[in-house]
Image (cartoon, grey):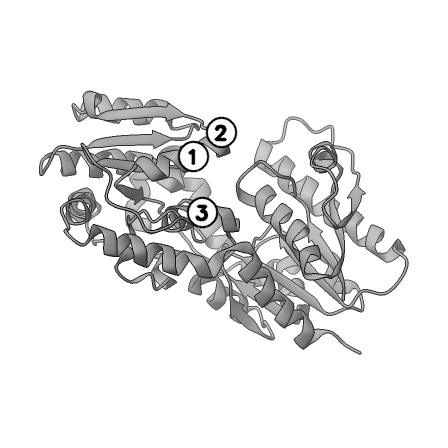
Amino acid sequence: MKILLSAFQCYPGHGSEPATGWQWASTLPEFGHEVTVLTSSWNRPRIEAAGPHGAEFCYVDLPLRKATWLPAPVLSYDYYLRWQDAALRCAQALPGHYDVIHHVTWGGLHLGSQLWRLPVPMIYGPIGGGQTAPGAYWRYFGREWPSELARTAATGSLLRLNVRSRETIRNADVTLVCNSDTEAAVRRLGAQDVRFMLADGMPTEWLGEQRSRPDGLPVVFWVGRLLPRKAPVLAIEAFAELRKIMPARLVMAGDGPLREQVRSAVQRLGIDQDVQLLGQVPLADVKPLYDAASVLLFTSLRESFGAPFLEAMGRGLPAVALDHHGIADADVGSAAVKVPLPARPRDLPARMGAALAEILSDSRWEARSVAAINWAAGWVWPAKVANAIKIYHEVARP
C-alpha cells in the first residue's frame, strides 16, 4: 500500500508532536508499506542525522513572515496554515498514485488539513482539541484566562465558522479522536466516521515489566511544561495536603513560564525541604525518574489526553489524575485513582492529596502496577500502527 503521511512536526529524540510524527513515519514502513512523508524543512537536519528508516521524506520549505510584532503563537499558527497550502501543492506535484492519506501532526481540531482536496481517501488524526478548561478553575490560569476563554469560544459556538476545520472534518473518510469532548465537536461539524485512538504512543522498549514498590521515602513525580493549563501550582498544593497525612517527597521535571510561581508556592506552603524542582530534563533521562517514583501526579486542567500518564502506565507507575477529558475516557482499572473536579476549587488539593495517600499506603501497589502495564501495552506504536492499517484497508479505493 502507498501511504502519503502528513507530519508537519517529525523528528526523533523529542517528545510531543515531533515524536508522534516520527513514530508514524518510522513504524509504517516496518509493516511493508511504501510511505511518503510531507514535513517541514526545519525537521530535515534531525531526520537525516537519524539515518535510513524506510520512508521517503518530502521537505516543504516556507519562508517566515517578517511581521515579528505578532505574538509567537499567532506566528506559529500562521506559518502552519501556510505550510498546509504549500504541502498540498507539493502533494499535487508528486508522481504516482497513493492509496490513502493520513494526517498526523499537528493533531488538532482547530487547524485542519488541506490534503482532503486530493482525490484520495483521507484519515485525519488522532486529534484532540475539543476539550475546554473548567470555568470555576480560572485562578490557575492567571493572566492567561482571557486567552483560555477565547479558545473555549472557538471550540464551542464559533467552531462552525472555522472553515479549515469544518471542511477537513466533513471530507475526511475517518476522523480519529483521543477524547469524547473532541468526538462531540467533530460530530457537530458533520464527521462521517469517528473512531477513538490515543494521539500518544510508546516505543515497545519503553514498556516495563512487573516490579515491586520502590523502597524508602515515597516519591511523587510530576512531569510536564510549567504552563497554566497543566496546573503545576495545583500539584504543589496537592502535595502539601499529602504531607499533612504522611512523609513523602515531590520531584517535578519541566520548565516554563510558571517557574517562579511554582517556586513561590513551594515556599509559601513551607515544603521546601520536600520538593525537588529539576527544571527541563532530557527525554532519555525521564525513564529513570518514572522508575524511581512511587506515584505519578497528573494535574492538567485542559489536556487532550496526556503523554506523561501513558508513559507512567507503561513503566508500571500508578497515577493520580483528574477525572476529565481524555483520561476520563480511559479504562485503566486500578492503575489510577481519578479525582472528580469538585464544584469548589479550594476542595481539590485535599482530595488529590487523599488520593495520593491512598495509593502510597495501599498494600495492592504491585497489582496497580501490573494493571498499568497491561493497559499501556495496547498503545505501543506497533499496535497503534497495526490498527491504523486496518482502517487504511477499509477506506482504500480500488
State which tag comes first along the sequence, 3 or 2. 2
- In space, the residues marked 3 and 1 are separated at their CA atoms by 12 Å
- Tell me where residue 42 appears, x and y as whole percent: 72, 34
For mark 3, what is the residue?
307
Residue tagged by mark 1? 286
Check disc 1 and report its element: helix, strand or loop: helix
Most extreme residue toward the left is: 245
Left or right: where 185 falls relative to 88: left
Q: Secondary structure at mark 2?
A: loop
Q: Which label's residue is closer to the chain start, 3 or 1?
A: 1
Give the x, y percent position of residue 369. 29, 52
Q: Which mark is residue 63?
A: none
Residue annotated with mark 2: 282
Q: Is residue 120 above or below residue 370?
A: below
Q: Residue at x 60, y 75 (%)?
A: 192
- Residue at the bottom extreme? 398
Q: Is residue 287 left or right of residue 194?
A: left
Cα separation between marks 2 and 1: 7 Å
Distance between the alpha carbons at the discs numbered 3 and 2: 15 Å
- Residue 53 is situated, as x and y percent measured from the top left of the image, at 72, 46
Residue type, label 1: Val
